[in-house]
Amino acid sequence: MGSPASKQHVAFVAFPFGSHPGAIFPVARAVAAAAPSAVVSFLATARALASLPAADDTPNLRFVPVADGVPDGSPPPREVLELIGLFLEATPGNLKEGIAAAVAGAGGAPVICVVSDAFVWKSGEVAEEMRVPWVPLCPGGTAALSAHLHTDLLRRKLGVGDQALAGREEDLLDFIPGLSVHRVRDLPEGVVTGPLDSPFSVLLHRMADRLPKAAAIAFNTIPGLEPAIEESLATVFPKPFIIGPFHILAPPSAPAPDPNRCLPWLDRHRPDAVAYVSFGSIMTPPPAELAQLAEGLEASGVPFIWSLKETARECLPPGFLERTKERGMVVGWAPQLAVLDHPAVGAFLTHCGWNSVLEGIVAGVPMACRPLFGDHRMIARSMMLAWGNGIGFEGEAMTKDGVFKALDALLRGEEGKRLRARAAELKQMANKAVAPGGTSTKNFASLLDFLLPEIKLNS
């Protein structure tokens, strides 16, 4: 692993789609800040790297582009699944080339450890060829990860396809530790239903097979949030480190831009009065639901900020923007962390992506859950039944009446008080974990010792 006088070099590899690069980037920044004499290379496609904030306060953190698999001279596909397929076809060759470029850029300092998003499981093969440790980072929730780790068991027990759901959609997964509140129909696509042989489903299955062979592993969750799953994972992985929430390990040195002036608008509202609505960057609810959501927002009388893609605005009811302009903002993009952290925001209507949920927890905001795909259903179920900081919609789909009732529950009355109190408790749990002496802070220090055992670290 080198001598104390040598240049230590750790390579991070991102899964360059959706929120994944931004989810693991704070871990790389935190490592670079704690070990200023080390080199930290962050590998992702050029498009993914361009989406990340600058790391001017950590000059030893370097961006290294890797090939995305799109043939030279060809326009990139519009569909994200096609882009993912091309990237996967390019691995691990593009990763090897990227690491070679990282070494050259670091003056020849060899990479002593490969840290990757768990989705890029082929990084483990690359690390094995290099004879260095592979440490995957799991940016998603541990409940869905546990389901993926038990894919073969689930398929044996439930069958696959229609057979897995026939009359058993509501059956609980209580035969897997920590999943006793989750149902068969909450499982991510690709475990027992959906296109099991799609490139993405195969990726997740192979990931689950490969992860237990890693030298160590780090989880983006709050210690104590899911104790039964934590205990189960500790029996699978030899060196598990719970260091979440990742996004507050190393907060950005500069505030995110606010081109639509969401924050000054929020300054004009009283505490816990505003609803924030966002469904992430990948998918949007069906057009009919967007119209129902708009009608529910209008009927509620609640002030709101709605982060909505420009292309989806045609789904809004005629005249909606004009009728609600005095108490609502519909913007193409909002600085989500800052918006959620603003005292005026008292409700978050979300798709239940793990990053958004953790950001909501850290901000202490109760949530209304409209899961869309993947692990969203398991996360929503956890919030509603295990953690007590979220509510759902009847039948999951949003209706005008359902949105009205959800906002009323979150922002008014006794149920709102209960939900806000529980959200405040979870916020305290998260911030205590990353405070000096907190469990995540201690676990991160142990992870640093594993990654850089021969280097002097900043305290």
Image (spheres, rainbow, N blue to C red):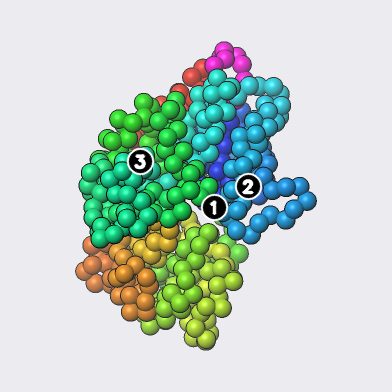
* Mark 2 Cα shell of 10 Å, populated few (<14), some (14-19), many (≥20): some
Residue 422 against residue 96 in the figure, above or below: below
Q: Is residue 344 left or right of 257 when viewed as pictured?
A: left
State the SS at label 1. Answer: loop
Kindly identify which numbered label has been placed on residue 361. Answer: none
Outermost right residue: 73
* Disc 1 target residue: 18
Asked if residue 80 can be seen in this view, the reply is yes
Q: Earlier in the sequence, mark 2 or mark 1?
A: 1
The picture places residue 137, in percent across and down from the top left corner, at 46, 37
* Disc 3 target residue: 152
Q: Earlier in the sequence, mark 1 or mark 3?
A: 1
Q: Quadrant of residue 8?
A: top right
Kindly identify which numbered label has been placed on residue 86. Answer: 2
| Residue at horizontal 53 percent and vertical 69 percent from the top | 308
* Mark 3 Cα shell of 10 Å, populated few (<14), some (14-19), many (≥20): some
| Residue at horizontal 32 percent and vertical 49 percent from the top | 159
State the SS at label 3. Answer: helix
Work out how far the residue at label 2 is from the one at label 1, CA to CA, in angstroms: 15 Å
The picture places residue 456, in percent across and down from the top left corner, at 52, 21
Front in this rendered view, residue 74 or 449: 74
